[in-house]
Amino acid sequence: MTDPKVREDGLTELDTNDVARWVGKPLGGGRLKDPVVTNDIRRWAQGMQNPNPLHYDEEYAAESRFGEIVAPQSFAVCTDTSHGAGPAIQGVIPGQHMIFGGDEWWFHGPRIKPGEKVSQERMLFDYKVSETSFSGPTMFSRGDTIYINDAGQVICKQRSTSVRYLAENARKKGLFADNVERSWTDQELEDLEKQKFEYYQSFRDLGHDKRLFVKEGDKISRRPIGPHSLMSFTTEWRSYLMTIWGSWNTHGVTSHSDSGWLPEMSRDKEGAKIDPTYGDGLYHGPSRGHVQERYAQLIGMPRGYGYGATMGAWIIDYLSNWGGEWSTIAYSNMQYRAPALTGDIAYLDGEVKKLAHDSDEGPVAEIEVVMTNQDSAVMAKGVASVQLPSA
C-alpha cells in the first residue's frame, strides 16, 4: 500500500492497488448451513413488507399453481451471506465504506421452495473510479453471484454494484448535511395506510388468475412503503438468514471481510466467539450505520438508512405481485441513486413500455420502474422484463 494522495480540494484519492488482482478470480465466502424452511420465506415476506399470501398462507398457496408456499423471486438474495455484494467488495481500500449502487438480475426459472439448500458461485466482474457529489473519488465495482439449487440448476445470477468510497471524504462533502427527518401528521399517515391497502388489493384481486390483456402504456398500481424507521430497518435486517447466529460458515478465498473497513465498522471475529453480536454486523460491523445514527454520520449519512438489497427486493416483489403467480421476472436492471432514510416514504411506480410477442411461452413485457421519495427525489430506476403467460 502506498500513502494516500490528498488532492488540492482536501479530498483523499482512493488507493485501489489491491483490487485489480481479484478481478475474474473465483471467490469463496459465506454459505448457509441449512436448507430453507417455510418460516424463512414467511419471515422474508414480513421483513420486505410484502403481504402476498402466496408466500405466508399455506391454505392460499395450496390453491396456487405451485400447490404450496414458495419464495418470491426476491428471496434468492436472502440465501446469500452478503446481500450478493460480497464479490463486489474485493481488495483492500483503507478507510473505505460501501453502499449499494444497483443490481442486475437474470432469472432462469426454478423457484426456491422449502427444503431446498442454495449455494453460490462468486466473482468480481469489473470496477471503475468516478467522481461523485457524495464522496469525490468513488469506486463502482460489479460482482457476480450465481445461485444454484440442490439439483444443480441455476436459479438466477445477480450482478451487484458496490459503491466504495472513503468515509472521510463523504463527511467532508456533507451531501446530506441539511437533510432533516420528516414528520407526518395523523391524517397523512391515515391516507398512506389507505394507499397501501389499495396497492395490496391490486394483487389480491388478481388472485390465482393469469395476467392477461396487457398493453403498452399500462400503469402498475403505485406501491407506497414507509415511513421508514429504525424498527422497519431492523425487521428487514432480521429477515436475512445470514443474521441468525451460527447460520453460516465460510469457504474458499475472499477479502470481503477485510476490505479496509473503518475500525468502528468492522466485525470482531474473536469477540464473536463469546458474544455473537460482535460479528453480527448490526450491533458491531458494517451494517450498524443503518440503525445507529452516530455510525451513519461516521460514513456520511445523516441518520438511519435502509439496505440496498432491500430496495432491490421491493422492486422485484413489486413486479412479481403485478405479474402474478403465472408470470416470471426474466431480467431486471436497477440503479440505486438515493438512500431510504428514516422518516421517508418510498413510492414505486411502473409502466409497460414495450410488449414482445415472439416467445412461445407468452408475451414479454418490458417495464420501467421508478422509486421516489415524498419529495420526488429518485431513489432507484431501471427496466425489467416480465414473462407473461399465454392465454
Image (cartoon, helix red, strand yellow):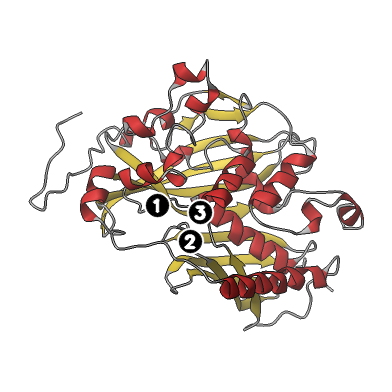
- The mark closer to the camera, 2 or 3, is 2
Point out the image quarter for the C terminus. Answer: bottom right
Residue visible at 13% across and 40% down in the picture: 5
Q: Give the residue furthest to the left.
A: 8
Question: Residue at label 3?
Answer: 103
Residue visible at 60% across and 68% down in the picture: 224
Point out the image quarter for the N terminus. Answer: top left
Q: Residue 185 carries which label?
A: none
Query: Does 276 sit above or below residue 336?
Result: above
Going by the numbered disc 3, the residue's amino acid type is Asp
Q: Residues within 10 Å of mark 1 (few under 14, many from 20)?
A: many
Q: How crowded is mark 2: few (under 14 residues within 10 Å), some or many (20 or more)?
A: some
Question: Residue at label 2?
Answer: 343
Alpha carbon of mark 3 to alpha carbon of mark 1: how far?
Answer: 24 Å
Residue 68 coordinates in the image, percent (x, y): 87, 49
Q: Are marks 1 and 2 in contact (CB under 8 Å)?
A: yes
Query: Does 188 sit above or below residue 286?
Result: below
Alpha carbon of mark 2 to alpha carbon of mark 3: how far?
Answer: 25 Å
